[in-house]
Image (spheres, rainbow, N blue to C red):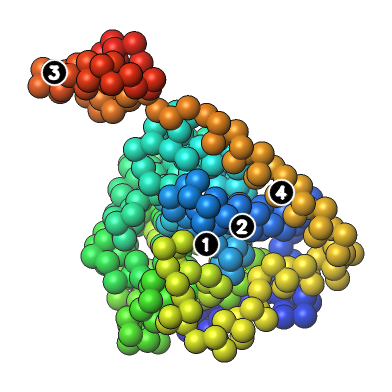
Amino acid sequence: MTATELLSVIEPDGAINGYDPKMSDAELLHCYTTMLRVRAFDDTCMKLQRSGRIGFSIPNKGVEATQVGAAAGLKKTDWIFPSYRDFGMALYHGITPLEMMHNMYGNALDAAKGRQMPVHFSFEKPIHFFSISSPIGTHIVQGVGAAYAMKMRKESNVVLASFGDGGTSSSGFHSGLNFAAVWKAPIVFLCQNNQWAISCPSEKQTASESYAIKAKAYGMPGVLVDGNDLLAVRKATIEACDRARKGLGPTLIEAKTFRLGGHSTSDDPTRYVPKELVLEWEKKDPVLRFERFLKKKKLWNEDTRAKIYDAAMEEVNEAAKVAEGTPRPALETIFSDVYAEVPAHIRKQGQASFDLARRKGDAAAGDGAFPL
């Protein structure tokens, strides 16, 4: 594998080019099911946002193979420092649509208690899924710090830090890769090159031959992989993780893919993405490509897709109903989970807010007791 030659495993027609992923039929179908669940979650969130029931979402159509392929290369004990376009990583490892939907509504059962924007998930198990950050690149250096701590503790875990091509223009990318290489930290950097940093195309962002080739300057391997090929991404991730577990340090993987929707629900990609480019990449749809692969293994037909997608939509729609019906966080949560001992001025502000809420008849004011 190199930083300039594209690694692929599944041919466009679904044939496999000699690589044996050593995956059971159940594992392959789990990958496929996860991609369809991402699409179901996406479709539902778009409708919820457009109808004013949630405030924001991030489309994932076209990049599902990169997410799921990378997740499939990790162990449950590993840590994910995700970008905000990584729904598939959470779903692959057993995070439920309901847990994710609680965050979309920011309700009382949201792990962040409504303090984060929608799509900013954070989960402790069944895999460590670090809180998503809006500022670009900040989580890269955080991931490096976590990986270095694992090395100091002599753990065999690995960190996967995922980011878009836009993230490579952040200071966090450069300082993160530099220190990771110096420390030989057990981390895998995954650049999901979907070719647009919001409306900025790659050619206006870097003059490098690839993003993967940037790894050479920091003293680590760079790997360029077909991001629409789930098995290729998984292969590259497994090999990078194995290298990290052996104490050989980090790897930068560039997964070349293409988002078929907007940057977010606040974005109109038709204003800057040429229509013919979208049509070209629609023919490379990673879900269709994986279906052709599964069909050759006699694991897929049209009924398979309908059955799995319908079940996914039913699950996600039910999750949305439950999350929408869940009360919003109580007022006292504004002041909890920050200080071990609440300072006097914060306590005074909290009590004043409870008194005001009681006078205004706010049902979410709680009993007026300070939480700590």
* Labels 2 and 3 touching (C-beta < 8 A): no
Gap between marks 4 and 1, in whole Å?
A: 17 Å
Amino acid, disc 1: Pro
Label 4: state its secondary structure. helix
Tell me residue 128's x, y (percent).
48, 40
* Labels 2 and 4 touching (C-beta < 8 A): no
Between residues 113 and 295, which one lies in front from this camera angle? 113
Circle 4 residue: 312
Gap between marks 2 and 4, in whole Å?
A: 11 Å
Label 1: state its secondary structure. loop
Q: Quadrant of residue 155?
A: top left
Amino acid, disc 2: Asp
Circle 1 residue: 59
Badge 3 local density, few (<14 within 10 Å), some, or many (20+)?
A: few
Q: Residue at x 79, y 72 (%)?
A: 292
Amino acid, disc 4: Ala
Mark 2 or 4, nearer chain start: 2
On screen, residue 5 versus residue 316, left or right, reads left
Mark 1 or 3, nearer chain start: 1
Foreground disc of the pair 1, 2: 2
Mark 3 or 4, nearer chain start: 4
Label 3: state its secondary structure. helix
Badge 2 local density, few (<14 within 10 Å), some, or many (20+)?
A: some
Circle 2 residue: 43
Mark 1 or 2, nearer chain start: 2
Tell me residue 47's x, y (percent).
57, 55
